[in-house]
Amino acid sequence: MSKQKNYYNYSKLGKFFHWGFVILFVYGVAKQVDNINQLKDNTFFRFEILFALIFLVLLLIRIIYMKKTQKTSLPEDTPKLQKKAAKIVHNGMYVLLLGTVLSGLLIGFLFWVDLNDNFLIDITITIHELIINLLYFLIGIHILAATYHRLKNDGVWSSMVPFFKEKK
Ligand code: HEM
Ligand code: HEM
């Protein structure tokens, strides 16, 4: 059991990025392309690419900002292995978020240059889906870990989550 409690708090902008991206990601999944033929609709196609480009730019800004100004709120006495696991899951989610949007844009590009009956686009779609499923898996672990910290009352949950806050 960790004796230390951490009172570190993510900045307002850090929390805004974190929760803003939860909303953006859920929206992106909800409005996902169900069928490649949907891309033949020009308005739909343009909206999809615009959404992906905005997502990409904001994600890059978020990663730079978080890496340069914020640190994890895990208490100092957290076992090394656990610190490492948290780092892998956080960085893994960033890599997979980037992978989702970049593979999506590559699908869009292949479609745009009329390679939509080509095996290349099939491979890219398979990779896009694989990345998204890995991302779901990491998000599942991440939420379980956050819940574990909430039960442990070590301050990690409240450093990022605005509800069910721990008492100081
Ligand atoms: C789309 C879903 C989510 C993604 C992609 C995500 C991603 C991340 C990332 C990358 C970090 C590291 C800090 C940063 O760079 O922003 C983080 C921190 C954190 N997240 Fe999430 N998150 C998601 C959903 C959630 C949810 C639903 C909860 C809680 C119910 C949560 C709780 C936390 C907490 C407590 C931290 C701080 C951990 C620490 O300081 O070590 N996250 N999240
Ligand atoms: C942040 C951006 C994006 C998100 C969050 C996202 C999300 C998703 C999700 C959740 C799926 C279903 C995966 C599965 O069933 O396992 C999917 C499939 C797909 N996405 Fe994306 N996507 C994004 C960008 C794009 C872009 C820019 C394009 C192309 C213009 C694209 C084209 C496709 C296609 C063709 C499929 C497969 C549809 C099928 O099953 O035939 N995606 N995407």
Image (tube, grey):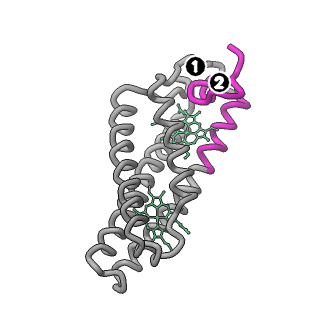
Q: Secondary structure at mark 1?
A: loop
Q: Give the mark nearest the N terminus, 1 or 2.
A: 1
Res 103 visible? no
Judged from this view, the residue extending furthest toward the left is: 113
The answer to which of 56 and 87 lies nearer the viewer is 56
**In this rendering, is residue 53 above or below 69?**
below
Q: Position of residue 108 (x, y in %)?
A: 35, 68
Q: Amino acid at mark 1?
A: Asn
Q: Secondary structure at mark 2?
A: loop
Residue at position x 41%, y 80% in the image: 122
Q: Image quarter for residue 103?
A: bottom left
Q: Is residue 62 magenta?
A: no
Residue at position x 30%, y 81% in the image: 115
Q: Position of residue 110 (x, y in %)?
A: 31, 74
Q: Amino acid at mark 2?
A: Asp
Circle 1/circle 2 CB separation < 8 Å? yes
Q: Image quarter for residue 147?
A: top right
Residue at position x 47%, y 73% in the image: 38
> Along the horizontal axis of the image, is 120 left or right of 14?
left
Q: Position of residue 146 (x, y in %)?
A: 63, 37
* Marking on residue 6: 1
Magenta residues span 140-168
> Which residue lies under the disc numbered 2?
154
Quadrant showing the C terminus: top right
The answer to which of 6 and 29 lies nearer the viewer is 29
Which class describes the residues within 10 Å of circle 1: few (<14), some (14-19), or many (20+)? some
Q: Image quarter for residue 156?
A: top right
Numbered label tally? 2
Q: Is mark 1 within 8 Å of ligand 1?
A: no
Q: Position of residue 41 (x, y in %)?
A: 42, 72
